[in-house]
Amino acid sequence: MSAVTSLPTYAPKDFASDQEVRWCPGCGDYAILKAVQKALSGLRTKKEDYVFVSGIGCAARFPYYMNTYGLHSIHGRAPAFATGIKLANPSLDVWLVSGDGDLLSIGGNHTMHLFRRNVDINVILLNNRIYGLTKGQYSPTSEFGKKTKSTPIGSLDYPINPLMLALGCGCTFVARTIDIDLKHQEQMMLRAATHRGTTLTEVYQDCNIFNHQSWFYASQKDSRPDNTVMLEHGKPLIFGKAGDKGIRLNGTHLEVVALGNGVKPDDLLIHDETNLAIAFALAQMNHPEFPEALGVLYCDPSKRPYDELVKEQIDQAIAKRGEGDLVALLNEGDTWTVDN
């Protein structure tokens, strides 16, 4: 007779550590932390099975504030650490939380390989389009012409689009949300948590000290309806304060149209989160020409996770060749004897 293991029941506060949360007053990171704690409390997974990994930056303090296992790693290398943790113990639920500078600049190469390998890790990218911890230099996502302490005349770099990078590298779950919408953040975290493979959830996050109002067009009550569109699988792309605008496919290009005068909801693009071409098009919708997409852009559950494939390969090798002998391995083939 097998023992029945009861699943734990948690409240969001159970995921809060005893550490004082120290971000600047008004920082969007507070809301993101609350959203993650709230989402995890509904998953019925043991706290001991979670590991939060971060790199360097304001966002990288995240593991200290989660009452789970965690690792504050080195600059840009969080994806490598997270991959190692998952491969060493595939039963762990690994989350990686860091910023646009850490993951897309010094860590860009590691992030790219995490996406292409499809390791079962949930990545939360806090994007404030600035280096906040080092006091306001431009970042890989800063807009062209951005004037900062390191670009006083204006940046000549074109920004990285995190969603496009993830899609281009083969990430199997790509979503976007915003710090002021706690409910939507929670929904995206829950969707990511149930996906097998690498997930990227980009969060538009306000740095109210060094880059305040960067996302105001997408976050303020009066401007948000006209500047964002909420994605729902199987539903037309409708937006606007009165729900009177939509996104239509015109040949191979998207266009904004006004509903009425012969334009019906049936004429609009129907969101299909399994369609990679649609995801690419949505990822390229930028303010002010288009409303920016919030929600799940792409989800492909069919691609097997890297960690699962690695374990399978190891099991096959052991079945064929036995457990192996490390000492014998080190001493096989050509060896040399070094005399004093």
Image (cartoon, grey):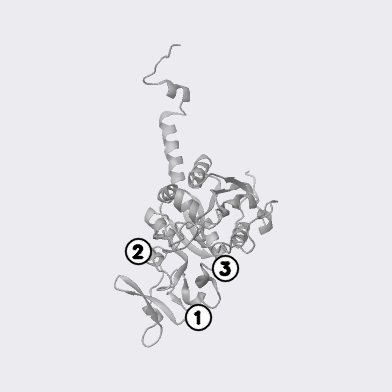
Question: In the displayed structure, would residue 309 be above or below residue 142?
Answer: above
Instruction: Name the foreground residue: 202 vs 45.
Output: 202
Q: Quadrant of the C terminus?
A: top left
Residue sticking out furthest to the front: 153
Label located before the other in sequence (1 or 3): 3
Q: Residue at x 41, y 80 (%)?
A: 265
Kind of residue at badge 3: Asp
The image position of residue 23, as x and y in percent, is: 63, 57
Reply above or below: 21 against 273: above
Residue 11 visible in the picture: no
Read off the residue under disc 2: 277
Q: Nearer the viewer, mark 2 or mark 3?
A: 3
Please name the residue that numbered disc 3 is placed on: 181
Which residue occupies the foreground of this view, 141 or 78? 141
Q: Residues within 10 Å of mark 2 (few under 14, many from 20)?
A: few
Residue indicated by mark 1:
241
Q: Position of residue 166 (x, y in %)?
A: 42, 56
Left or right: 303, with 98 as reference point: left
Whether the residues at callouts 1 and 3 have beta carbons within 8 Å, the answer is no
Q: CA distance from mark 2 to mark 1?
A: 28 Å
Q: CA distance from mark 2 to mark 3?
A: 27 Å
Left or right: 265 in relation to 2: left
Q: Residue at x 48, y 49 (%)?
A: 120
